[in-house]
Every structure is written in C-alpha cells, then in structure tokens.
Amino acid sequence: MPTWIKSFKAATAVVVFGLLWWLLGLVILVAGLYLMGLPVLGGVGLTPPPTGLTNFVLGAVVAVLGIAIMLLGFLASFLKVVVESIVEEVKSLRI
C-alpha cells in the first residue's frame, strides 16, 4: 500500500506537469485567438494581424490545438504518474 508521502509526491507531480502543459496550451490558444483577429491581452503593443477568412480559420485551428494540448497534456501527465506509482508498488510487492 502506498504511503501518504508517496501519494502526495505523485499528486504534486501531476499538478506541476499539468500546469506546465496548461501554460503551453494557453500560449498556443492565445496565439490562435490573436490570429483570428480577436483582441487578446488588451492589444498590448501588438499590431493587429491581417484580417480575412484564411487567418480566422487558421487561428481557430491553432486555438483548438492549444486546447487539445492543455487537455491531453494534463491527462498524459496524470496517467504517467499513476502508472509509475502502480509499477513501483507492484515491484515492492514482488521483492
């Protein structure tokens, strides 16, 4: 049975890796919204991108990619830590 310390270490790893993936996905999402022509970050020193249907569609694809990176990255982090914890416990039982 895993100890509380191991459990909290695993939970901390999930949160840290999840936040890293969330941050990366957020940057890509904001870039996609910017390409779509939507105001992001209050237009802080950014020149507006060229408008048009092509940029809007490209921005939408990039924004969806950013959301997918956030979700899948967090899920992958969770599964990686859980599997590593399970393997470690099974190894300790077999010895």
Image (cartoon, grey):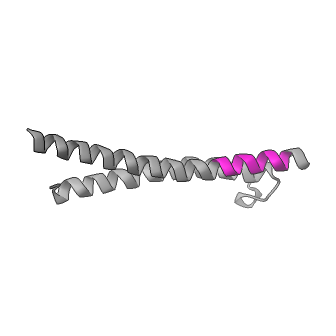
The residue at 82%/48% (across/down) is 57
Does residue 22 appear left or right of residue 77 in this picture? right
Q: Is residue 51 visible?
A: no
Count of labels shown?
0
Query: In the image, is 50 to the left or to the right of 22?
Result: right
* Residue 91 or residue 32, whichever sits in front: 91
Report whether 4 appears left or right of 66: left
- 1 in the magenta segment: no
- x 29%, y 43%: residue: 84
7, 87: nearer the viewer: 87
Q: Nearer the viewer, residue 56 or 45?
A: 56
Residue 63 lies within the magenta run: yes
Expressed as whole percent of the image width and height from the top left, the position of residue 95 reads 8, 38
Main SS of residues in magenta = helix
What segment is highlighted magenta in the picture? 55-65
Q: Nearer the viewer, residue 26 or 69?
A: 69
Rendered location of residue 52, percent (x, y): 91, 48
Is residue 3 visible in the rendered structure shown here?
Answer: yes
Quadrant of the image containing the N terminus:
bottom left
